[in-house]
């Protein structure tokens, strides 16, 4: 119990500066740092995190020394089911064994600006099927144009996740379908509660 309390306190401290990457790079508040190719950002909406996302995060942790899972949000156009803070919390809850290896954060604005702010040299994206390619290709090229010093790296999700997406999971669950195979068990409860009582904006 005492251990759990301590863990919570550590997490709270780490999340004190959303969008600055301060939780992952001490003293980085707003500063532009030179990119570190061992430090990766895995960006996305994560609304909600799925087992497919968890699979990519675990793979990224094998390749990079520091992985920041970055929840993108737009305060002016927020149609998300979960608030950015809830999404960050769900990421931590889904990865209890990666405490200390993975940092979850949220940001608004351009991804490449966030990458510059925290000094990350790599953007990680997960690929499922060929259908992902065009969207990912466009995004990669735009990000490269905006910030040539940051490289995008693709990791293939495990085949059992090829048809998992947050959008589909929400749709299936909304109509009463079983999504336990697709959503980490630690976040299922919040997910079902949110379906019963949609978020107030
Ligand atoms: O989970 P998603 O929706 O596929 O993630 C898309 C995301 C969040 C990575 C992308 O929309 C993004 O980077 N948003 C931040 C704003 C930005 O930089 N847009 C230009 C991207 S080329």
Image (cartoon, rainbow, N blue to C red):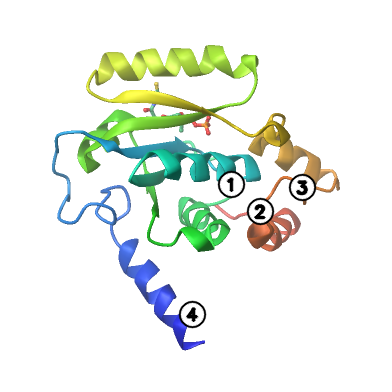
Q: Position of residue 115 (x, y in %)?
A: 28, 35
Check disc 4 and report the residue beneath it. Answer: 4
Q: Position of residue 155 (x, y in %)?
A: 51, 29
Check disc 2 and report the residue beneath it. Answer: 184
Residue with the most extreme bottom position: 2
Check disc 1 and report the residue beneath it. Answer: 49
Check disc 3 and report the residue beneath it. Answer: 181
Kindly report the distance in space between the C-alpha atoms of the residues bearing marks 1 and 3.
Answer: 13 Å
Q: Which marked residue is nearer to the observer: mark 2 or mark 1?
A: 2
Kindly report the distance in space between the C-alpha atoms of the residues bearing marks 2 and 3.
Answer: 8 Å
Element under label 3? loop
Q: Residues within 10 Å of mark 1 (few under 14, many from 20)?
A: many
Q: Residues within 10 Å of mark 4 (few under 14, many from 20)?
A: few
Q: Are marks 2 and 1 in contact (CB under 8 Å)?
A: yes
Name which of mark 1 and mark 3 comes first in the sequence.
1
Q: Say whether residue 71 is visible.
A: no
The vertical placement of 78 against 163, above or below, is: below
Element under label 4? helix
Q: Which marked residue is nearer to the observer: mark 1 or mark 3?
A: 3
**Image quadrant of residue 127?**
top right
Q: Which marked residue is nearer to the observer: mark 1 or mark 4?
A: 4
Q: Are marks 1 and 4 in contact (CB under 8 Å)?
A: no
Name which of mark 4 and mark 3 comes first in the sequence.
4
Kindly report the distance in space between the C-alpha atoms of the residues bearing marks 4 and 3.
Answer: 27 Å
Residue 30 lies left or right of residue 153; in this view the side is: left
Element under label 1? loop
Residue at the image position 53 percent from the left and 57 percent from the top: 95
The vertical placement of 145 against 179, above or below, is: above
């Amino acid at each position: 119990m005492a251990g759990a309390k301590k863990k919570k306190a550590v997490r709270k401290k780490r999340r004190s500066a959303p969008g600055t990457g301060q939780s992952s790079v001490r003293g980085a508040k707003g500063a532009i740092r030179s990119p570190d190719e061992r430090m990766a950002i895995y960006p996305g909406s994560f609304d909600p995190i799925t087992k497919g996302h968890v699979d990519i995060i675990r793979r990224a942790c094998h390749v990079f020394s520091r992985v920041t899972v970055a929840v993108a949000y737009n305060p002016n156009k927020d149609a998300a089911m979960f608030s950015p803070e809830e999404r960050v919390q769900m990421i931590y809850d889904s990865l209890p064994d990666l405490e200390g290896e993975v940092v979850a954060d949220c940001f608004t604005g351009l991804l490449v600006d966030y990458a510059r702010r925290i000094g990350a040299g790599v953007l990680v994206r997960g690929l499922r099927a060929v259908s992902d390619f065009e969207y990912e290709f466009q995004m990669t090229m735009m990000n490269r144009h905006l910030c040539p010093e940051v490289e995008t790296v693709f990791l293939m999700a495990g085949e059992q996740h090829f048809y998992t997406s947050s959008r589909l999971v929400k749709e299936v669950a909304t109509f009463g379908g079983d999504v336990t195979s697709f959503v980490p068990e630690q976040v299922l409860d919040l997910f079902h509660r949110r379906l019963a009582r949609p978020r107030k904006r």
